[in-house]
Image (spheres, rainbow, N blue to C red):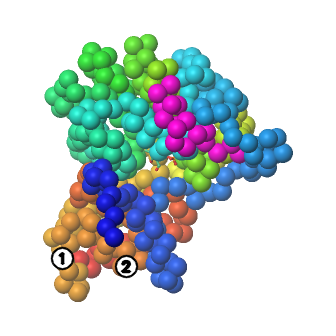
Amino acid sequence: MSIHLASRLDRVKPSITLAVSQKAADMRAQGVDIISFGAGEPDFETPTHIKDAAIEGLSQGASKYPAVGGITKLRAAICATTEAVHGFQVSPDQVLVSAGAKHSLFNLFLALLNPGDEVIVPAPYWVSYPEMVRLVGAEAVCLKAHPEKGFALDMDELRAAINDKTRAIVLNSPSNPTGAIYSRELLQNIADLCVEKDILVIADDIYRQLVYGDGEYVSIASLGEEIAKRTILIDGVSKSYAMTGWRIGWTVGPKEVIKGMTKIQGQSTSGANHLAQIAATEALVGPQGCVGEMRDAFDARRKRMVELLNGIDGVRCQEPKGAFYAFPDVSSFIGKSGASGDTMTDDVVLAGYLVEKGVALVPGSGFGCPGFVRLSYASSMEDIDEGLARMKAALEELE
Ligand SMILES: Cc1ncc(COP(=O)(O)O)c(C=O)c1O
């Protein structure tokens, strides 16, 4: 028997971040001592008041199907959050709750794009953007952000990338994988260009609450009425409230976009998990101290990780201003060889070499940025110290 799979599968690569986390978990299960900086998830438990709200929710009908678009209380909380953060009013029919921000993005691309349409994706990018765009038959136009300018986009290059097939640009600030934040000035320039060219902005602001030092999160949607009308906001509870496993994210956008996405969600997954929506509601309306506590812990780890990385000869790491990733340039090791004679032909081989030395991280090629690697500092201080000591020793062995 031969089974033929859909040709769309040929357009998609598996997620490299999930593959690295899985490899580290498998090695650990086999008893290998491995420290993983691969996963993009907080190591904290979901705060107790959020878990308690879910337990309480079980006795309040949460075992029934929720409305496709999301439960009333959560959608109301998202409307209030949108007004507070982005400075404009939205109604519940401009909100769709989905099974994580990843699901929100997938619904969005399905609802928005036709084959041949183009979406501009600044690189380095979160691994799933280009793959999802391709999966729905459209084209991802990856536009290089410049490491030497703090991973900022060049406005002339952005203008040149826009043509009559361009439907949208994806912005992710703070960024996974670089931790960079778009400046107000750059966002204003992008907003003006998007209004001029009448293209949509997909603002994935899932890390907006994780900003450190002198970093400032600016919502592009807050920069004027015209850009607000063209912005589709993607957000969720996974990162800021340590709720990755609950799988709740949402989209806020123009009514017709939300209606289209809701139609797709209604015929595919239906409403997101009811109990998790109750927990997410509590995350948004309950005490916010937990976010600050986790942010302070990430900040201390961020400083340590960057200091240790820059203490390795040949590694150059810019200070990440947000999210929980460091994205150092390790290109000086490409071409060098280990004691067993293996040559580090690229960052993927280098990451493979480091896994063998007991430290897992993600090669930059997966994010469209060869010569770099991504390390998550959402790990304990002990792991950061030990993992970076292993990385230093392993890199110093290369000649
Ligand atoms: C930039 C970015 N957007 C979206 C997501 C997806 O988040 P969720 O867990 O809500 O699906 C992630 C998760 O890694 C991310 O880094």
Mark 2, residue position: 357
**In this image, 344 relative to 302: left or right?**
left
**In this image, 345 relative to 212: left or right?**
left
Instruction: Check if residue 46 falls in the magenta segment.
Output: no
Compared with 173, 309 (above or below) is: below
Q: Element at badge 1?
A: loop
Compared with 20, 140 (above or below) is: above
User: What is the three-letter code of the residue carrying label 2?
Assistant: Lys
Q: Give the quarter of the figure containing the C terminus.
A: bottom left
Give how far across and how far down residue 251 sits, in percent.
Answer: 51, 32
Q: Element at badge 2?
A: loop
Mark 1, residue position: 343
* Residue at 69% over, 40% down: 65
How many callouts does the rendering have?
A: 2
- Residue 185 visible in the picture: no
Instruction: Check if mark 1's residue and mark 2's residue have beta carbons within 8 Å.
Output: no
Instruction: Give the label on residue 363, or none.
Output: none
* Residue at 29% over, 44% down: 134
Q: CA distance from mark 1 to mark 2?
A: 15 Å
Q: Which residues are magenta?
A: 259-275
Give how far across and how far down residue 267 sits, in percent.
Answer: 52, 38
* Residue at 55% over, 36% down: 266
Q: Image quadrant of residue 306?
A: bottom left
Identity of the residue furthest to the right in this view: 59
**Does label 2 point to a residue whose CB lies under 8 Å from ligand 1?**
no
**In this image, 32 relative to 79: left or right?**
left
